[in-house]
Image: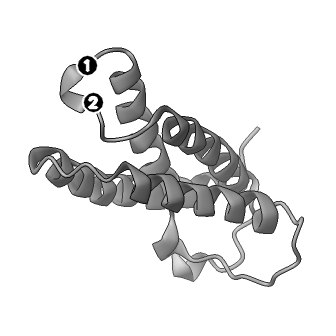
Amino acid sequence: MRFKGYKRVKKVYPVWFFIYATILLVMLILELKIPEFFFWLLLVLLLKVILVNYGFIKVKIGTHYWAEHAPLSILVFMIGMFDLLGINSLDGYFTGTTTVIAGLDFLFNFSNDMVKEQKNPKEI
């Protein structure tokens, strides 16, 4: 079975993964530890996905391919998991709560993107 949004995810996610990976790499190199910022950012994104994308709040929002945040969520989740596994060089960048929120955000957003029908393929 082929998912309706697979083609778009395959084109858009790698680009955003590279952009977010570059930003997080710079953050790690410069040792910028701002866990509260990522906690609130990912909490807002998770609530947006749950409430708006799954229809709990009826808001007409178009699909914006420039606003993909699932790659950010999976990167934050991976860094947080490495921190929880005991890699001391990643200590303090993200809290355990932020790691859980990032994992949930990725699952909900990715599953929503995979089943979503492409409405305007020219925007890809």
Looking at the picture, how far across and down is residue 39, in whole percent? 49, 52
Residue type, mark 1 in image: Ile
Crowd around label 2: few <14 · some 14–19 · many ≥20 (10 Å): some
Q: What residue is shown at x 18% (from left), y 45% (from top)? A: 28
Query: Would residue 69 be found to the left or right of residue 60 on screen?
Result: left
Query: Would residue 97 be found to the left or right of residue 16 on screen?
Result: right
Query: Would residue 116 be found to the left or right of residue 77 on screen?
Result: right
Q: What residue is shown at x 50% (from left), y 61% (from top)? A: 41
Residue type, mark 2 in image: Asp
Q: Residue furthest top?
A: 86
Q: Secondary structure at mark 2?
A: loop
- Look at discs 1 and 2 and give the one toward the viewer: 2
Q: Which residue is mark 1?
A: 87
Looking at the picture, how far across and down is residue 30, in whole percent? 10, 51
Q: Which mark is residue 104?
A: none
How far is the residue under mark 1 from the one under mark 2?
Answer: 7 Å
Quadrant the N terminus occupies:
top right
Q: Which residue is mark 2?
A: 91
* Whether residue 96 can be seen here: yes
* Whether residue 69 can be seen here: no
